Image: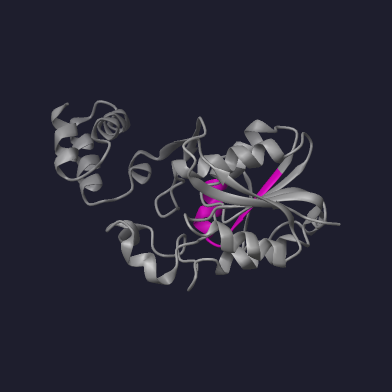
Amino acid sequence: MSELAQRLAAAGFVAPDEEAAELIAAARGDDDQLEELVARRLTGEPLAWITGTVSFCGLTIGVSPGVYVPRWHSEALAEYAAAALPPGGVGIDVCTGSGAIAAVLGARRPEARVVATDIDPNAVRCAGSNGVEAYAGDLFAPAPQELRGRVDVVTGVVPYVPTAELTYLQRDTFTFEGTLGYHGGEDGLEVFSECAREARRWLKPDGTIGLEVGRGQEATAAELFEQLGYTRTTVIRDDEGNVRGISARSVG
């Protein structure tokens, strides 16, 4: 382990060797610049904000400071949605952040039209820099109206942390990222429920909706889908069997 990796490990970072390598690469041989980057990381600032990029589903995604950093555990949802999106189809990714999932959909289905939305204009600019057709506004409000009833796939890493569990998140999360990308209301599913209701007006018959949820929320989320008239609910899991999202099909 290098000296830099040892410093990161001593500060409590769980992947010190990988982080050290990314910081060194970002500094491009400038020792003073490297020290500045390391100092930022030691405050808990997200690594992706410091290096400017993150790897997601094999793509390099640019991440601007202040924008929600896509996590690896959202990759299962992205790949599931990409498989459900037909060639030449239409996809909408809400709460897009850096546009990571939308970028994956576009990469896997280059003939499809994929649009994205986010309430944060800074995130919309970041998504645009990643080649995503992105619009600023809440959920579906800013999406092009001509897509109503024509969408094959709706995705979203919607906020799903219940109010009472916000205090359990990592100590630096709210220092840098704030609660916007995490707080899902009292039960964690307020935004999920709103998104599922609105999506019915955008999805075509038998279209797919896939939203991220936390462990233990899948049963309640499935009930919400069923109450809203969706069918064929499916729990999305990663390769290790962990719950990463839930999907359902719209009806005509």
Left or right: 237, with 226 as reference point: left
Extreme right residue here? 252
Residue 193: x and y in percent read 62, 66
Left or right: 36, with 195 as reference point: left
Please give the count of numbered marks on the rendered protein.
Answer: 0
Does the segment drawn in magenta span residue 13? no
What colour scheme does the image use?
A: one colour
Instruction: Please tell me whether residue 13 is drawn above or below residue 200 in the rendered image.
Output: above
Report the front residue among 190 and 139: 190
Residue at 45% in and 61% down: 182
- Whether residue 27 is visible to the viewer of this picture, yes or no, is yes
Residue at 66% in and 38% down: 82
Left or right: 181, with 218 as reference point: left
Residue 164: x and y in percent read 38, 71
Report the front residue among 211 and 33: 211
Instruction: Please tell me whether residue 162 is drawn above or below residue 170 in the rendered image.
Output: below
Bounds of the magenta segment: 114-127
Left or right: 75, with 248 as reference point: left
* Image-quadrant location for residue 10: top left
Residue at 21% in and 41% down: 38
- Whether residue 131 is visible to the viewer of this picture, yes or no, is no
Residue 141: x and y in percent read 68, 65
Residue 99: x and y in percent read 56, 46
**Which image quarter holds the C terminus?**
bottom right
Report the front residue among 86 and 115: 86
**Which image quarter holds the N terminus?**
top left
Residue at 60% in and 61% down: 221
Does the segment drawn in magenta span residue 123? yes
